[in-house]
Image (cartoon, rainbow, N blue to C red):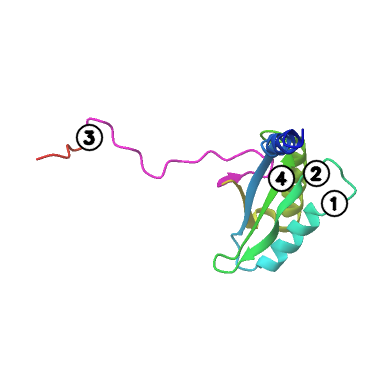
Amino acid sequence: MISIRPALFLSVLVAACSSIASSDYRVVSKDPKVTPAQMLLVVNRALDRPESTTMARLSSWASVDEKTREVTFGLASFGGGRTPGIINSETQLLRALHYEFGDRVEVFRNGDRLRWDGSVEPQTPSAPRPSAQEEQPLGP
């Protein structure tokens, strides 16, 4: 019986961890007058809402990348995909950043640019891939 309990505990722990949704965010300034410290303050203020139980939790502290001058952080919530907690936190964040900076900053989620309404901006391909007829043979 003793060996079954740890196995059961580990199974429950693995099942719980597999249902955690997370997203990584970057806030980038397009205006040199907007400092990383200003962006960091707005991000922390927007996501630090203890009165709301439907907000996602920061999975990593918001920090400034000194090389790129970007604010980076992660959000995590229990569930699959984009949970209501992540959606609510993201909406709060986008509102606060848009109110404070307007179009002078951009927000990226998992590498995709977010519009102010929360939708993902479609990525344009950097260079179209050549068709099979245009590819050169590799041999002599």
Q: Main secondary structure of the magenta part?
A: loop
Between discs 2 and 1, the one toward the N terminus: 1
Amino acid type indicated by mark 3: Glu
Between discs 3 and 4, the one toward the N terminus: 4
Quadrant containing the C terminus is: top left
Between discs 2 and 4, the one toward the N terminus: 2
Residue 20 badge: none
Q: Quadrant of residue 71?
A: bottom right
Q: Which residue is mark 3?
A: 134
Q: Which residue is mark 2?
A: 55
| Span shown in magenta | 111-134
Above or below 93: residue 81? above
Q: Are marks 2 and 1 in contact (CB under 8 Å)?
A: yes
Alpha carbons under labels 3 and 4: distance apart: 45 Å
Q: Secondary structure at mark 1?
A: loop
Q: Residue at x 64, y 65 (%)?
A: 64
Q: Which residue is mark 4?
A: 76
Alpha carbons under labels 2 and 3: distance apart: 50 Å
> Is 130 covered by the magenta stretch?
yes
> Is 3 covered by the magenta stretch?
no
Q: How many residues crowd mark 4 within 10 Å: few (<14), some (14–19), many (20+)?
A: many
Alpha carbons under labels 1 and 3: distance apart: 55 Å
Residue 82: x, y in percent? 68, 36
Amino acid type indicated by mark 4: Ala
Q: Residue at x 79, y 53 (%)?
A: 46
User: Is residue 113 shown left or right of residue 54?
Assistant: left
User: Is residue 16 shown left or right of residue 114?
Assistant: right
Residue 15: x, y in percent? 69, 34
